[in-house]
Image: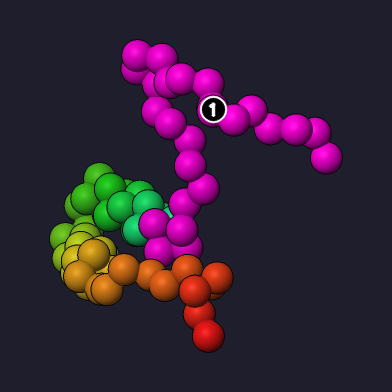
Protein backbone atom coordinates (compact mmCIF):
# COMPACT_ATOMS: atom_id res chain seq x y z
CA UNK A 1 0.00 0.00 0.00
CA UNK A 2 1.34 3.44 -0.90
CA UNK A 3 1.91 6.02 1.85
CA UNK A 4 -0.66 8.76 2.21
CA UNK A 5 0.08 12.45 2.78
CA UNK A 6 -0.23 13.77 6.32
CA UNK A 7 -2.48 16.56 5.08
CA UNK A 8 -4.69 16.43 2.00
CA UNK A 9 -4.18 18.92 -0.81
CA UNK A 10 -6.07 22.14 -0.22
CA UNK A 11 -9.36 22.69 -1.98
CA UNK A 12 -9.26 25.40 -4.63
CA UNK A 13 -11.87 28.11 -5.01
CA UNK A 14 -15.02 26.67 -6.56
CA UNK A 15 -14.12 23.06 -5.74
CA UNK A 16 -15.85 20.85 -3.22
CA UNK A 17 -13.94 18.71 -0.75
CA UNK A 18 -14.53 15.01 -1.34
CA UNK A 19 -15.49 12.90 1.66
CA UNK A 20 -16.80 9.39 2.04
CA UNK A 21 -20.52 9.82 2.70
CA UNK A 22 -22.21 7.87 5.44
CA UNK A 23 -24.96 5.50 4.30
CA UNK A 24 -27.55 7.97 5.59
CA UNK A 25 -25.95 10.90 3.73
CA UNK A 26 -25.84 8.84 0.54
CA UNK A 27 -29.53 8.00 0.94
CA UNK A 28 -30.37 11.64 1.59
CA UNK A 29 -28.52 12.67 -1.60
CA UNK A 30 -30.41 10.03 -3.56
CA UNK A 31 -33.73 11.24 -2.17
CA UNK A 32 -32.82 14.83 -3.06
CA UNK A 33 -32.34 13.72 -6.66
CA UNK A 34 -35.69 11.92 -6.62
CA UNK A 35 -37.34 15.04 -5.20
CA UNK A 36 -35.88 17.17 -7.99
CA UNK A 37 -37.12 14.73 -10.64
CA UNK A 38 -40.61 14.59 -9.12
CA UNK A 39 -40.85 18.39 -9.10
CA UNK A 40 -39.53 18.62 -12.67
CA UNK A 41 -42.15 16.10 -13.80
CA UNK A 42 -44.92 17.95 -11.96
CA UNK A 43 -45.69 15.03 -9.65
CA UNK A 44 -46.66 16.90 -6.50
CA UNK A 45 -47.73 13.81 -4.56
CA UNK A 46 -44.40 12.03 -5.14
CA UNK A 47 -42.55 15.23 -4.25
CA UNK A 48 -44.50 15.47 -0.99
CA UNK A 49 -43.71 11.86 -0.04
CA UNK A 50 -40.00 12.23 -0.81
CA UNK A 51 -39.87 15.56 1.03
CA UNK A 52 -41.39 13.89 4.10
CA UNK A 53 -38.86 11.05 3.91
CA UNK A 54 -35.98 13.53 3.77
CA UNK A 55 -37.42 15.37 6.78
CA UNK A 56 -37.66 12.15 8.75
CA UNK A 57 -34.05 11.25 7.94
CA UNK A 58 -32.83 14.67 9.01
CA UNK A 59 -34.76 14.37 12.27
CA UNK A 60 -33.12 11.10 13.30
CA UNK A 61 -30.38 10.88 15.90
CA UNK A 62 -26.85 10.95 14.45
CA UNK A 63 -25.54 7.61 13.24
CA UNK A 64 -23.41 5.52 15.55
CA UNK A 65 -20.16 4.55 13.86
CA UNK A 66 -19.55 0.82 13.51
CA UNK A 67 -16.34 1.09 15.56
CA UNK A 68 -18.25 2.40 18.58
CA UNK A 69 -20.92 -0.31 18.56
CA UNK A 70 -20.77 -3.03 21.16
Residue 36 sits above or below residue 25 on the image: above
Give the left or right position of residue 27, taking residue 54 as reference.
right
Magenta stretch? 1-25
Give the left or right position of residue 40, taking residue 19 as reference.
left
Residue toward you, 63 or 59: 63
Residue toward you, 2 or 32: 2
The image shows residue 69 at horizontal and vertical percentages of 50, 80
x 47%, y 63%: residue: 23
The image shows residue 6 at horizontal and vertical percentages of 59, 30
Say if the magenta span includes residue 24.
yes
Which part of the image, by quadrant, shows the N terminus?
top right
The image shows residue 18 at horizontal and vertical percentages of 48, 35
Q: In the image as oriented, which residue stretches furthest toward the top?
A: 13
Please tell me in which quadrant of the rendered image residue 24 appears.
Answer: bottom left
Please tell me in which quadrant of the rendered image residue 54 appears.
Answer: bottom left
* Snapshot colouring: rainbow
Residue 30 sits above or below residue 54 on the image: above
Mark 1: which secondary structure?
loop
- Residue identifier under label 1: 8
Give the left or right position of residue 44, taking residue 1 as reference.
left
**Predominant SS along the magenta part:** loop
Amino acid sequence: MAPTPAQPASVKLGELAMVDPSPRAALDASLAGALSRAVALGDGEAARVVHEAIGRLLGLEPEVRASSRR
